Amino acid sequence: MTAVVIDNLSIAFPTARGISHAVRGVSLTIGTEKLGIVGESGSGKSLTARSILRLLPASAQVTADRLSFDGIDVLRASEAEMRAIRGKRAGLILQDPKYSLNPVMTAGAQIAEAWRTHRKGSRRAALQAAEHLLEQVQIRDPQRVAGAYPHELSGGMGQRVMIAMMLAPDPELLIADEPTSALDATVQAEILRLMEDLVSRRGMGLILISHDLPLVSHFCDRVAVMYAGRVVEELRAADLRRAGHAYTRGLLDCLPTLSDPKVRLNVMTRDPAWLT
């Protein structure tokens, strides 16, 4: 896995009230590791990750001193060069399979389509590859699931199909945007164990976007904490409980715990200085 380099990334959108700065001066480097990006909704997590694939709205105003994937300048790359990165070298797992999978195509057909797009094999080979990929994501009856439509699958199965689809081209980087938020706790744990196993075996990099700080601290190698479009703190995931920034401490203090039950949870007190 070749490094992704983000240096001084800014993303803004024109609005009726002027320019809205959604991401401001973000710098990150991602290699063969599991990087967690955490923060509240609207902090710029998904926009930062999607900028790597140049999957932003046409109205987005994107600037960066450097935004590269394996040395390719993402901001200046042609659409053909970006198509060679999207899906083939970097996969994106979205939040809820109910809204991400095509409702009129079977699961196997969707995985096979992703496989054929990047590997140029026959239809039969693609369908066989789809069943093999479903086996890799620990689906017990891959032939039946391959022939099922998304509405016939549970949330956990749908998410496994999404992961299989993203793995079809054998990518170097996997971006998982809240991949377990629509699942119950038991299925969440199964999906995360599956992703960890696949990332380790395939030697991939992983960006995990999440609101769940305990999950990220146990699953990832490194964590970037975002607030109002900025990275306010970056640290080893194992050190998250010892975070130094007041915003990160505030997020941790708002979490309910069985060891220290409270009548009322803490409320975040925000400092205007965090914006600068």
Image (cartoon, grey):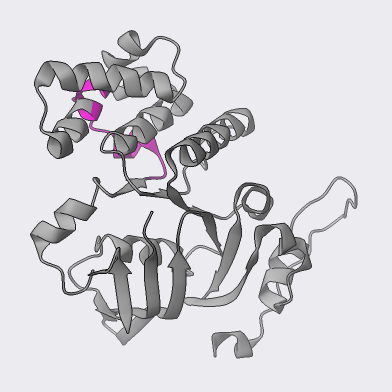
Q: Is residue 140 left or right of residue 125?
A: right
Check residue 108 for magenta coloring. yes
Residue at 35% across / 34% down in the picture?
162
Q: Quadrant of residue 120?
A: top left
Residue at 20% across / 18% down in the picture?
127
In the image, residue 57 sits, relative to residue 173, either above or below, namely: below
In the image, residue 122 sits, relative to residue 272, either above or below, namely: above
Instruction: Assign the C terminus to one quadrant of the image.
Output: bottom right
* Range of residues picked out in magenta: 94-111
Residue 96 in view, yes or no: yes
Check residue 226 for magenta coloring. no
Q: Position of residue 77 (x, y in %)?
A: 15, 68
Q: Is residue 210 left or right of residue 80?
A: right
Q: Position of residue 216 (x, y in %)?
A: 62, 52
Q: Work out whether residue 2 or residue 272 is closer to the camera in this orientation and state it.
A: 2
Residue at 46% across / 51% down in the picture?
206
Residue 106 in view, yes or no: no
Q: Is residue 122 left or right of residue 250?
A: left
Residue at 36% across / 59% down in the picture?
2
Q: Quadrant of residue 160?
A: top left
In the image, residue 127 sits, relative to residue 219, either above or below, namely: above
Q: Position of residue 167 (x, y in %)?
A: 33, 36
In the image, residue 81 sits, relative to residue 194, either above or below, namely: below
